[in-house]
Amino acid sequence: MKVAVFSTKPYDREYLKEANQIYRYKLDLFEPHLSVKTCKLAFGYEVVCAFVNDCLDAAVLEELSRNGTRLIVLRSAGFNHVDIKAAEKLDITVARVPAYSPHGVAEHAVALILALNRKIYRAYNRVREGNFSLDGLIGFELCGQTAGVLGTGKIGSVFIKIMQGFGVNVIAYDPVQNPDIAVEYVALDELFSRSDIISLHLPLTPATKHLINKQTIQSMKKGVMLINTSRGGLIDTPALISGLKSGAIGYVGLDVYEEESDIFFEDLSSQIIQDDIFARLLTFPNVVVTGHQAFFTRNALKAIAETTLRNIRGFQDRNIPKSNLVTSQLIGGK
Ligand code: NAD
């Protein structure tokens, strides 16, 4: 089986090659993102393997289908970059890695909270310059605060347990309640109005796009801390910037950004950032941005590589686990 693997970095190659020792598929590892321009690289490949910033819209899927692709394996849990309905129409199977390291992502969300609260990033730079002043570094105790969690699936439920360990009072919103966690579910507007910290752990779908917008920011507690390790499109970034400027939002920790596909995963340190909205975000002293690294643990890379190749074997054997299949049911379609 020939597999065209897009958006590969040295670490992907290492873990995929290791996992492939069992299967011995012919993995052709391409560096570019998948797009209308690059999909000709996949000509004649029955399987295409993609990551979060690859484009799998209708135009790309049609071209892949014409070129002989029958299976897309995503090296991610998120699937917002795939036009699922188009894939179904073209009879292309799409499989993902639904859970590879919920602990890694939840722990990264907690790392953002701690760094923002105790201003670790500012303290680190000050101390290195011999500045031991504490002015501007004051934090608050997490114990006794209220955290609102949107999405109580695999990552959200781990995040809740960690926060509860800190003595944080956790409230949650999810249309599907998780019976495995002890948490108070509340309506969305109540979550916004009661939370000192809000953490997003829900998928990006047409229904959740820009869930954090001008109106919802207005309904939050003044000075709220907002954490997003899910998908950038959940937040309307210009509204977020207005909220930061007015003080409505007190802290922001982001691992994802709506327009990240042109920025993240690359070394742009000697270039000028062309995205003025993103550049403005980086100027705030109370904003910490990481470049989509919440998943990035050894455990996760190993699990992603293994499940991705197992999904290909499942396709051959016609038994990909239902939880790994990406279908329109996941976005509320029929
Ligand atoms: P999951 O499917 O286990 O849980 C998602 C939960 O969100 C489900 O319980 C679902 O019912 C809920 N949900 C759906 N619509 C909602 C809404 N409108 N409001 C509130 N809740 C809603 O997914 P997961 O494994 O916990 O992952 C969550 C998200 O994290 C993924 O969709 C992905 O985008 C993101 N993610 C990011 C990284 C990273 O490196 N930053 C890594 C993995 C996953």
Image: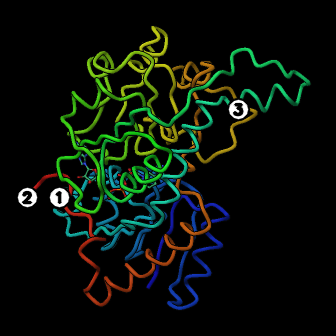
Answer whether labels 3 and 1 touch (C-beta < 8 Å).
no
Residue type for callout 3:
Tyr
**Farthest-out residue, top:** 246
Q: Say which quadrant the C terminus sits in.
A: bottom left
Mark-to-mark CA distance, 3 and 2: 46 Å
| Tag 3 residue | 121
Q: Secondary structure at mark 2?
A: loop
Q: Earlier in the sequence, mark 3 or mark 2?
A: 3
**Mark 3 or mark 1, whichever is nearer to me:** 3
Q: Position of residue 134 (x, y in %)?
A: 76, 19
Disc 1 and disc 2 in contact, CB within 8 angstroms: yes
Q: Is residue 246 above or below residue 158?
A: above
Q: Answer whether labels 3 and 2 touch (C-beta < 8 Å).
A: no
Q: Residue under circle 1?
A: 328
Q: Amino acid at mark 1?
A: Ser
Q: Is residue 266 left or right of residue 105?
A: right
Q: Residue at x 29, y 80 (%)?
A: 320
Ligand 1 under 8 Å from disc 3 Cβ: no
Q: Of callouts 3 and 1, which one flags the residue occurring earlier in the amino acid sequence?
A: 3
Q: Which mark is residue 334?
A: 2
SS for dot 3: helix
Q: Quadrant of residue 60?
A: bottom left
Q: CA distance from mark 1 to mark 2?
A: 6 Å
Residue 1 image offset from top left, x and y in percent: 43, 85
Q: State the residue at coordinates (18%, 56%).
A: 85
Q: Residues within 10 Å of mark 3 (few under 14, many from 20)?
A: few
